[in-house]
């Protein structure tokens, strides 16, 4: 399922236009993105939690020539499923 599919489902379930549904999805994803950029945790009850984790620096290699190189540390988004989502997958 992709963003367009989610837009269709939301429009159908809520009885709104696809344009309005797409706008709501955009607002939701932007709000989550802004919160994560500010190092805030986003929790949606019974669904899950979005957080930011820091991946440490490590030694890698350049695939073009095989030379060693340092890969810098970086921040990555992490999603952890909530109890409601986990139980619905296993019922």
Image: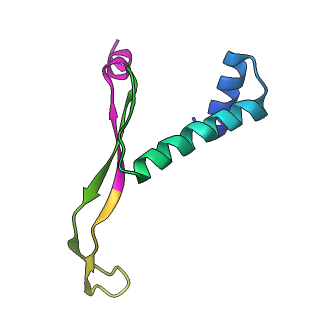
Query: What residue is at 41 percent from the left and 48 percent from the top?
Result: 36
Would you say residue 2 is visible in this rendering?
no
Name the colour scheme: rainbow
26 magenta-colored: no
Q: Left or right of 73: which side holds 8?
A: right
Locate residue 88: give its quadrant: top left
Identify the image quadrant of residue 4: top right
Query: From the viewer's perspective, is 84 left or right of 9?
Result: left
| Residue 66: percent from left, percent from top | 28, 85
Residue 58 pos. (x, y %)? 20, 71
Front one among 53 and 65: 53
Location of residue 49 (image quadrant): top left
Is 22 drawn above or below residue 72 in the view shown?
Answer: above
- Magenta region includes residue 89: yes
The magenta stretch spans which residues? 76-91
- Place of residue 23 in the rendered image (x, y in percent of width and height, measured from the top left): 69, 37
In the image, 84: left or right of 1?
left
In the shown orientation, is residue 8 left or right of residue 74? Answer: right
Question: What residue appears at the point 65 percent right and 33 percent down from the top-left corner?
Answer: 24
- Work out whether residue 82 or residue 38 is closer to the camera in this orientation and state it: 38
Q: Residue at x 44, y 45 (%)?
A: 35
Residue nearer the viewer, 61 or 75? 75
Residue with the most extreme top position: 91
| Visible residue check, residue 88 | yes
Q: Is residue 71 above or below residue 81?
A: below
Q: Quadrant of the N terminus?
A: top right
Query: Residue 11's spot in the image, x, y percent?
Result: 71, 24
Where does the C terminus fall, quadrant-wise?
A: top left
Q: Residue 67, relative to residue 34: is it above or below?
A: below
């Amino acid at each position: 399922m992709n963003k367009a599919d989610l837009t269709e489902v939301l429009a159908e379930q809520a009885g709104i236009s696809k344009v309005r549904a797409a706008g709501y999805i955009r607002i939701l994803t932007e709000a989550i993105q802004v919160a994560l950029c500010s190092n805030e945790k986003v929790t949606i009850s019974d669904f899950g939690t979005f957080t930011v984790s820091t991946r440490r620096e490590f030694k890698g290699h350049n695939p073009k020539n095989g030379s060693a190189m340092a890969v810098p540390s970086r921040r990555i988004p992490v999603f952890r499923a909530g109890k409601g989502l986990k139980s619905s997958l296993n019922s």
